[in-house]
Structures are given as C-alpha cells and as structure tokens.
Image (cartoon, rainbow, N blue to C red):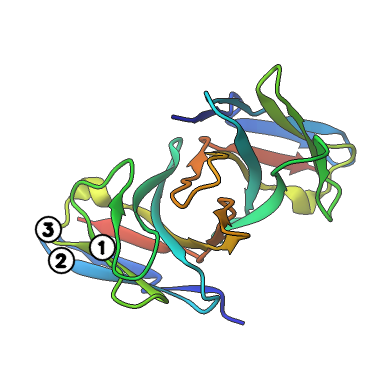
Amino acid sequence: NAGVTQTPKFRVLKTGQSMTLLCAQDMNHEYMYWYRQDPGMGLRLIHYSVGEGTTAKGEVPDGYNVSRLKKQNFLLGLESAAPSQTSVYFCASSYLAGGTNTGELFFGEGSRLTVL
Amino acid sequence: AQSVTQLDSQVPVFEEAPVELRCNYSSSVSVYLFWYVQYPNQGLQLLLKYLSGSTLVESINGFEAEFNKSQTSFHLRKPSVHISDTAEYFCAVTANYGGATNKLIFGTGTLLAVQP
C-alpha cells in the first residue's frame, strides 16, 4: 500500500524556471493538500482540494498554482520560481468519516526544492 | 480562525526521563486536536488525536495527551523516553464544523532531543 507518493523528491531550479510537483494517493481520499515546511515556521497550507476538479487557496498561495483533474492526483506548479520558494513541500490527503472531514492527514515523504 | 502555539522550540531530555511538550490553541468553536511526529527526512505521521469523548488520549508507543478545554491546552507527555523518540513533534488543530472544508493548522513544532 503506497499511501501518498510525491515526485520528485529533490529538485534544484534556477530563478524564473517552472516546475510541477506531483502527488498521488491510492486511498481514495476526498481531500488533498499541499503544505510547505520552513525552519521555525512549521507547516503552512498552500492550496487544498475538497474533490476532483476543485481547488482552493490556503495561507500562502502566492506564486503557486494547483490542479486536481483526477481524484487520486494533486499537482503543485511553480510558474516562475523564486529563492523564497526554497522549501520542503509536503502533500497530504484526508478522508470523510461519517460525512465529516475530521482533519486527520496522511502525508507523503516530502519534496525538497532549492531555487538558486 | 484557529491558531496553535508551541512555546518550546526544543526540549532536551535524558533517556528514561519524563517529558512534556506543551501545546496551546485558540479557537472560537469546538475543535479537533492532533499531535504529529516527524522523524528525520520523513513526512509527518499521526501520533494521537482528540475528536470527542475521553479527554485523555494515548498512542501505541506510550505517549499521551490530555485535552483541557478550560486551559485551551493539549500537552503531550511520556513518562519515560527512549533515544528513538528523538523527532520533531507538531501540534495541530482544526475546527469541529462537521463540514467539508476543515483545514488543519499546525504549530511551529518542538524538537525532542533525547540524550543517552
């Protein structure tokens, strides 16, 4: 059982380049999230999705775009990378229990992005 | 909106000693509370959660946390730590709306450093 899988795990970009991080989950979860983790700041929500074809902004959405064309996949795009986007990115998913999203998250192993 | 405060960024402790990691939250509505653990170079894993019922919740590896509504706290404790407990611990909160758009808000994390 793979759970939540993120690709790539490491990437180095130059300022202005674009890239896409892919998140795939095999648990049939409704909700998916992208977080970034920076030292001393914990995890901050970038964007999230409550179902196929839907996306919404989190705390720090600027400079990122997302898409959820299929229920199992959630893509995070950087159109023009900046050094401030150097971070570790985590994808997570969650499920409905009795019609309620309890907020319990299942995380991928992270993608370390460095922007030079 | 909800918020979480973890006042201790790092807690050093000797092996077999007790430990408490503090977490306070702020919310105008009822909440669900979580502790997640992150081992080096890994994603976050759920350690324990409070959704409803008994205010004392336990994990399978000896940690426990108590929901204290009057003090808006959810401190994590373990009576005797092991070297293998060395990790970063994140407290998280989400509103108990019972609805579809619950989002998890994380604290900044506490590094538990267990020394021999």
Circle 1 residues within 10 Å: few <14, some 14–19, many ≥20: many
Residue designated by label 1: A66
Q: Vertically, is A15 above or below B88?
A: below
Decide if residue A92 is on the left or right side of residue A21.
right
Question: Could you tell me residue B115's position as x and y percent?
Answer: 77, 41
Q: What residue is rendered at 86% in x and 33% in y? A: B18
Mark 2 residue type: Ser
Give SS at disc 1.
strand
Question: Could you tell me residue A98's position as x and y percent?
Answer: 63, 60
Decide if residue A19 is on the left or right side of residue A27.
left
Decide if residue A53 is on the left or right side of residue A51.
left
Q: Vertically, is A18 above or below A15?
A: below
Does any portion of residue B7 appear in the rendered image?
yes
Circle 3 residues within 10 Å: few <14, some 14–19, many ≥20: some
Residue A18, label in figure:
2
Q: Vertically, is B78 above or below A66?
A: above
Mark 3 residue type: Ser
The residue sitting at the top extreme is B70
Mark 1 residue type: Val
Q: Which of marks 2 and 3 is nearer the N terminus?
A: 2
Residue designated by label 3: A80
Q: Earlier in the sequence, mark 2 or mark 1?
A: 2
Decide if residue B17 is on the left or right side of residue A25.
right
Q: Are tags 2 and 3 found on a single chain?
A: yes
Q: Please state which of residues B95 and A11 is positioned toward the viewer in this rendering.
A: B95
Question: Could you tell me residue A56's position as x and y percent?
Answer: 29, 53
